[in-house]
Image (tube, grey):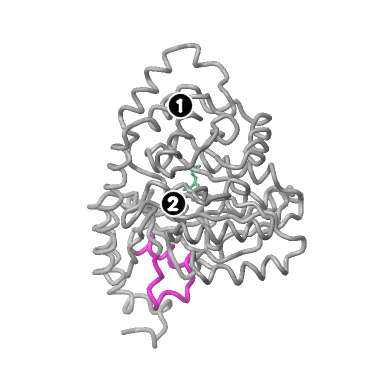
Amino acid sequence: MEEFHKVRRLPPYVFEQVNRLKATARAGGADIIDLGMGNPDLPTPQAIVDKLCEVVKDPRTHRYSSSKGIPGLRRAQAAYYARRFGVKLNPETQVVATLGSKEGFANMAQAITAPGDVILCPNPTYPIHAFGFLMTGGVIRSISVEPDETFFPPLERAIRHSIPKPIALVINYPSNPTAHVASLDFYRDVVAFAKKHDIVILSDLAYSEIYFDGAPPPSVLEVPGAMDVTVEFTSMSKTFSMPGWRMGFAVGNERLISALTRVKSYLDYGAFTPIQVAATHALNGDGSDIAEVRAVYKRRRDVMVDSFGKAGFEVPPPAATMFAWAKIPEKFRHLGSLEFSKLLVEKAHVAVAPGIGFGEQGDDYVRLALVENEHRIRQAARSIKKFLSTADDTMHNVISLNARR
Ligand SMILES: Cc1ncc(COP(=O)(O)O)c(C=O)c1O
């Protein structure tokens, strides 16, 4: 029987292949250190959990909730934007709560895309940025992820040579998986570009609060006039270690927010009210929870960069996000990222995310998530060191003769 139309547009998840190997190795008793999935391991701060427990006792909260988010939650998100970015939002018309930012992004794609519409999307990138549109019948044109002067000339060409003309541009800084961070000047150019070409900007700011060096990442909405063409997505998953709670936001242009709100009103009744109240409590907090989360990831990052570097696996320090994006060591690069990731599971008992899972431009890289503690990260580095130092002798079939020491 033929595959369903939509399912045909969703190839098997690349990460699944590494996950399967991981499961097999674990079933055989191996202790796999998992730097693969970006699934935060830190517990949600106690005060947020307590708020949920308190509110859930009230049976009135057990009814259907509000699809676009309870008013207090939308006000709290508007207050966060005002405080953090100096961006003024009307909580009634410019803010909608989503079931995690992934759901918000996918349903925005659904709301604005007609079959055949062209979307400009970074490569490599977090998969929903492309697949959200592919599922709705959109067509992806890949663009660069580097937020510098090299970004625009190919973008101009993409606009000129796409038929029909693209309707939207996806940006994601700090970037998953590359950890690139954009400056406000870059955003100014992006907004000017979008206005010149009459396209919409969809900005994924899931890592707004996970930064380590330099100034906090800006929002594209800080650019004067950006609101005319932009929607931005944020997430409670990383900021407050609440990935399982499924709480995020879309904010920005009223027409776009209204389109998303309309689609969602047909699909869901909003997150469980106690979750929305607890999320409101989190957003209205003093920021100390966020500072703690940030500090943990920063320490892990420093340990990873140092210990992996000493092990012979160079890892550039990410300035933000909970990921490092590392080039595969030279002598293994020809294997591609999927085969290299499988080798790491089998031979070093370390799971990583193969770069190819984020797009073809990612195939020379693997992504390492900072979701194991410092001790485990050092342990991973030791195993990788052993694997790399013995590979010449043990992997004749993999490493070509002239690539050996
Ligand atoms: C860039 C990016 N956007 C969105 C998400 C999804 O976040 P949420 O849990 O809010 O759906 C992730 C999760 O890893 C991400 O890395």
Badge 1 or badge 2: first in the primary sequence = 2
Quarter residue 340 falls in: bottom left
Distance of label 1 from label 2 (alpha carbons): 27 Å
Q: Does 330 sit above or below residue 2?
A: below
Q: Does 8 sit above or below residue 235?
A: below
Residue 256 visible in the snapshot: yes
Q: What's the magenta region?
A: 326-347
Q: Nearer the viewer, mark 1 or mark 2?
A: 2
Residue 361, given in percent of the width and then of the height, sits at: 54, 68
Q: Which mark is residue 247?
A: none
Question: Within 10 angstroms of label 2, few (less than 14), some, or many (20 or more) residues?
Answer: many
Q: Which mark is residue 218?
A: 2
Residue 195, given in percent of the width and then of the height, sits at: 65, 56
The one of 256 and 127 positioned closer to us in this rendering:
256
Instruction: Look at the image and tell me in which quarter the C terminus lies.
Output: bottom left
- Give yes or no for residue 205 being in the magenta stretch: no
User: For the stretch drawn in magenta, what is the main secondary structure?
Assistant: helix
The one of 400 and 148 positioned closer to us in this rendering:
148
The one of 273 and 217 positioned closer to us in this rendering:
217
> Mark 2: which amino acid?
Pro
> Mark 1: which amino acid?
Ile
Residue 24, given in percent of the width and then of the height, sits at: 42, 52
Quarter residue 162 falls in: bottom right
Residue 175, given in percent of the width and then of the height, sits at: 46, 56
Q: Which residue is mark 1?
A: 275
Residue at the limit of the structure toward the top, as seen here: 59
